[in-house]
Amino acid sequence: MAEVGVVSGDRVVALVGNPRSGSRTLGAAVEVAETVAKRAGHGEPVTVVDLSALGAHLFAPAPSPRAEIARELVTGADVLVVASPTYKGTYTGLLKAFLDGLPSRALAGTVALPLLVMGDPRHALAVEVHLRPLLVELGALVPTPGLALVEADLPRLQELLEPWQAQVEPYVTAAPADFR
């Protein structure tokens, strides 16, 4: 796994919008991305764009090279896992600020897999109602239901991923040639 705050690989990218470094959201996003990549037969390492390391760069008055590198990694992904904790019933402002910096249709042809980590299952629809439309607006193909994970269930994440992964695998395996 490579991280940004620096760079590598490009096929499967995990974009993490938690403002806290070392968060449970980061751990879940990496595990989901690595599972998706492995099951789909992608040989490259997963790249992680951890926005907790880029917050100041996203809000700087002048364009930041670090933020631009992160955006290039995200827009170059074939498969993009987009993860955020649920704040006030939706994704974080940090994730929104990062995605707002992308050009129109920047994710065209990218298979995007939305993931929200939440404290309460009552927020489960936020992944479909808020995060999916944002990714679609950016041109991403979001072929399956997003993944809504309750924090208390994170210790059994691999077990929870099995049925979701069965839905995701055909789309991830076909990416990118079939969708670009």
Image (spheres, grey):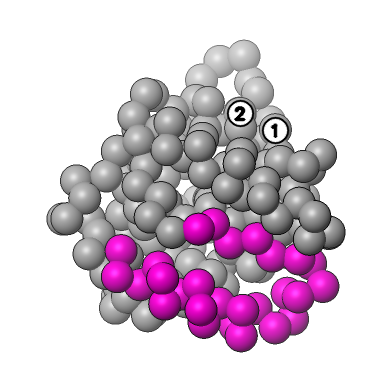
Q: Is residue 20 toward the left or the right of residue 61 in the image?
A: right
Q: How many tags in the picture? A: 2
Residue in view at x 48 percent, y 67 percent: 33
Query: Which of the 4 quarters of the picture holds residue 62?
Result: top right
Q: Which residue is mark 2?
A: 97
Q: Say if 161 sits above or below 118 in the image.
A: below
Q: Is residue 74 toward the left or the right of residue 119 in the image?
A: left
Q: Is residue 144 magenta?
A: no
The secondary structure type at the circle numbered 2 is: helix
Tell me if label 2 and label 1 are in contact, CB under 8 Å: yes
Q: What's the residue type where badge 1 is placed?
A: Gly
Q: Of residues 125 and 25, which is closer to you in this image?
A: 125
Q: What's the residue type where badge 2 is placed?
A: Ala
The answer, for residue 94, to whether it is visible in the render is yes
Residue 86 is situated, as x and y percent measured from the top left of the image, at 74, 48
Q: Residue furthest top?
A: 61
Crowding near the residue tagged with mark 2, few <14, some 14–19, many ≥20 C-alpha atoms within 10 Å: some
The secondary structure type at the circle numbered 1 is: helix
| Magenta span of residues | 145-171
The disc at residue 93 is 1
Query: Which of the 4 quarters of the picture holds residue 161?
Result: bottom right
Magenta span dominant secondary structure: helix
Q: Is residue 177 toward the left or the right of residue 23 in the image?
A: left
Q: Disc 2 and disc 1: Cα gap in Å?
A: 6 Å
